[in-house]
Amino acid sequence: MAGGRQRGQPVIRYYWEAFLALHREDLRGRALEIGGTSTLVRLGGSAITRAEAIDLVPRPGVDIVADLSRADALPADTYDCFVAPFTMHLIYDVESALYHAVRILKPGGTLLVNFPCVDYYFAAGLDMGTGRPLFVFWWFTPLHVENLLRRIGLTGDHFQLVIDGNLFSRVAYQMNMPVEELTSGERNHRDEGHPLLISARIVKPAEWQGARPEPRDPWVPATTPAMWNRETGHYPRT
């Protein structure tokens, strides 16, 4: 950090942007994004006919207030695409969240979602203005993600995974080094033994018959959460 601010782009965000660029044509029609619509507007452009945002609490720019893991009230077969970045590790009942993320897509609709393999851990939770502390419940492996997707009624014909990262980029991310300070080899080499981010493109099959997972609620500690500091990026203000 320089002057207390996040400098440059985190390498994990670099991987996600590269993945989105590969699948830009999926951003079309009636589209949904977690937290806001910036990705849809920036990359989808005129291909997006209606951009909507979903979040846990009402605020300007949020069209749907819902917990994705308990989103039974949202109608099925509604969206042409759904962008869900950097969220699944914060949801305890991630299987239910993925089920609903697929359910609300139209047949043939696309879910673009990612799963961090390494991230920061806030033992007391993190207050990001969502009405309740956020906790990191999961750090994913490719095998974990594959099993989650298969449990909600998908097969390998319905999704593709892109696994980015290596030992150096994992350490760089944890040390808050921006991607601009990494060489091309350091950021782009893919080491299956040291993944940093799993990005998934999931297309809802016309015949999808996923069964609603049994809801699961977490135990969380009674703590005073750290406050998110938007200037310094990942590091909270203590």
Image (cartoon, rainbow, N blue to C red):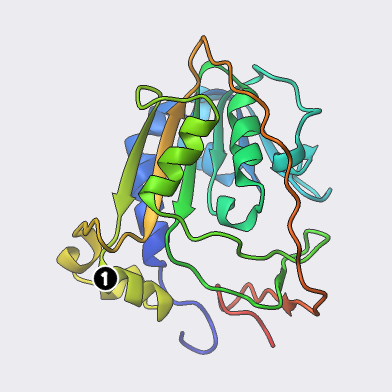
Query: Between residues 102 and 156, which one lies in front from this camera angle?
Result: 156
Q: Position of residue 105 (x, y in %)?
A: 59, 23
Q: In this rendering, does residue 67 appear at all?
A: yes
Q: Which picture quadrant has residue 132?
A: bottom right
Q: Position of residue 224 (x, y in %)?
A: 80, 80
Q: Which picture quadrant has residue 158?
A: top left
Image quadrant holding the C terminus, namely: bottom right
* Amino acid type indicated by mark 1: Leu
Q: Residue visible at 57% across and 50% down?
A: 88
The residue tagged 1 is 167
How many numbered discs, if any?
1
Residue 206 falls left or right of residue 197: right
Residue 109 falls left or right of residue 166: right
Circle 1 packing at 10 Å, graded few (<14), some (14-19), many (20+), is some
Q: In this rendering, does residue 112 appear at all?
A: no
Residue 20 falls left or right of residue 96: left
Element type where label 1 sits in the image: helix
Instruction: Return the residue found at the far left.
Output: 185
Q: Residue visible at 78% across and 59% down?
A: 130
Q: Position of residue 189 (x, y in %)?
A: 18, 60
Query: Between residues 190 and 61, which one lies in front from this camera angle?
Result: 190
Instruction: Return the residue found at the far top.
Output: 207
